[in-house]
Image (tube, rainbow, N blue to C red):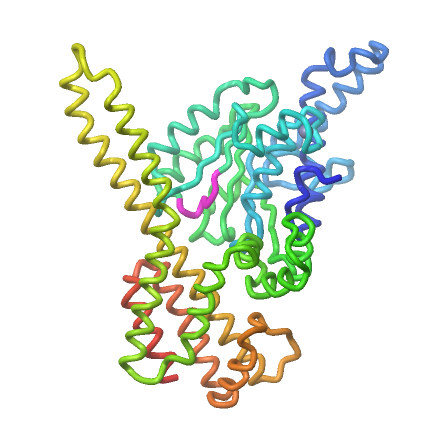
Amino acid sequence: MTDVFGDLVGQDEAVATLRRAAASAAAQLRAAAPVAAHAGAPAGAGDSEGHDDLDALAEEFDEPGADGPVASPAADPGAGMTHAWIFTGPPGSGRSVAARAFAAALQCVHGTGCGRCPGCHTTLAGTHADVRLVVPEGLSIGVGEMRALVLRAASTPSGGRWQVVIIEDADRLTEAAGNALLKAVEEPPPRTVFLLCAPSTHPDDVSVTIRSRCRVVPLRQPPAGAVAEVLVRRDGIAPDVAEWAAAAAQGHVGRARRLARDPEARQRRDAVLAVPRRLTGVGAAFDAASALIEAAEAEAAASVAEADEAERAALQTALGAGGTGRGAAGAMRGAAGQLKDLEKRQKSRATRAQRDALDRALVDLAGFYRDALTMALRAPVAPVHTDTAALAGAGAQKWEAEGTLRRLEAVLECRAAIEANVKPRIAVEAMMLSLWRG
Ligand SMILES: [Zn+2]
């Protein structure tokens, strides 16, 4: 029987930390309401037990980020509950899965994240009234969005447990939004818990001051075996396909599932892995760059088209409704502005989707040159892309270790350049030329 943490692949340590914290949080709620929690127990015993819990936990609750007092059961750094957490780890390691699971455990009526009660169910389904999820659709999370969120988060939880705010991609907060969040994290409302997800705790990702107020839950890149196992168990994928997809996705669980199930995702990957073979001259390098960019654009367009259309229809319905009466003229003037706002948001989301698609392609390509490098060095490790291992081996012979390393670096530099806002086409063209010249 699996609980809410069942989907966190290969993260035993993090899961243990979160289970202890959820139990601690539940004890704290019980302690705050000793009458309800100990209704069946003898009055005296129940009461004093409740207060002991409360004291021990309150002490730790006051020291977020610190490891708590030494020489008491609460001294275990993973044991206590705190009001702000950061989940870090490489893309696909399950940062947002971990944050959602922990939110469910906090809202679980049993306090364990049983996976079956209404608290668990509604949290995982995204419909719990006291759980707010921020998923940036554009390139960053703005200050307006963050202020509104912080305000809502300060209210008393309607379900009587916790107000939980999950911020996916906290590294995409604007500086102003980060400051708005920092104020809330510095002076947290008593029943509010912030769960941030970021690639790392590097100051580029999360400001030092926010970091200092949070407890960090590091997630690791799950081993391919663990990813394959969950694809078989949960998604019913055939073991040989699961193993191939888990290796090719380099520990990215969602990517592995997509590769195993979506023929178009497999075709796109095949096209990317054909690049090294196609680089026969300058013209071919530019062609390959165009093809890579256009494929990313097409993939992104397909992924956002449905949401764009639904939003546009919803806005038109909203604007079309109640079009008569005193406010109608003002409403019409406002409509143009709202439509413009929506288009701006959608454009920003499309850009993000393009960059994500391009980055996935670059990770695949990096995997190819990484395979070639391990072969050139005769390192005893399994290839990422088993299906292009022969090609990587041929490359390794031709380029030798040094030339292979330069090519791998060209791919990684291209990723870094795009992350630093270099125009993708320029970065990709430069990379293709380096891959051809070596
Ligand atoms: Zn539950």
- Residue at image coords 32%, 51%: 351
Image location of residue 419, percent across then percent down: 37, 59
Label tally: 0
Q: Would you say residue 284 is visible in this rendering?
A: yes
Image location of residue 336, percent across then percent down: 17, 31
- Residue at image coords 57%, 79%: 374
Up-down: is 7 above or below 385? above
- Span shown in magenta: 167-172
- Residue at image coords 32%, 38%: 309
| Left or right of 214, for residue 147 | left
Q: Is residue 168 magenta?
A: yes
Location of residue 294 by image quarter: bottom left
Location of residue 412 by image quarter: bottom left
Q: Which quadrant contains ligand 1?
A: top right
Residue nearest the viewer, comparing 299 with 151: 299
Residue nearest the viewer, comparing 381 with 387: 387
Q: Is residue 336 magenta?
A: no
Residue nearest the viewer, comparing 306 with 190: 306
Up-down: is 394 above or below 415? below
- Residue at image coords 73%, 39%: 75
Q: Quadrant of the N terminus?
A: top right
Image location of residue 88, percent across then percent down: 55, 50
Q: Would you say residue 401 is visible in this rendering?
A: no
Image location of residue 236, percent across then percent down: 66, 51
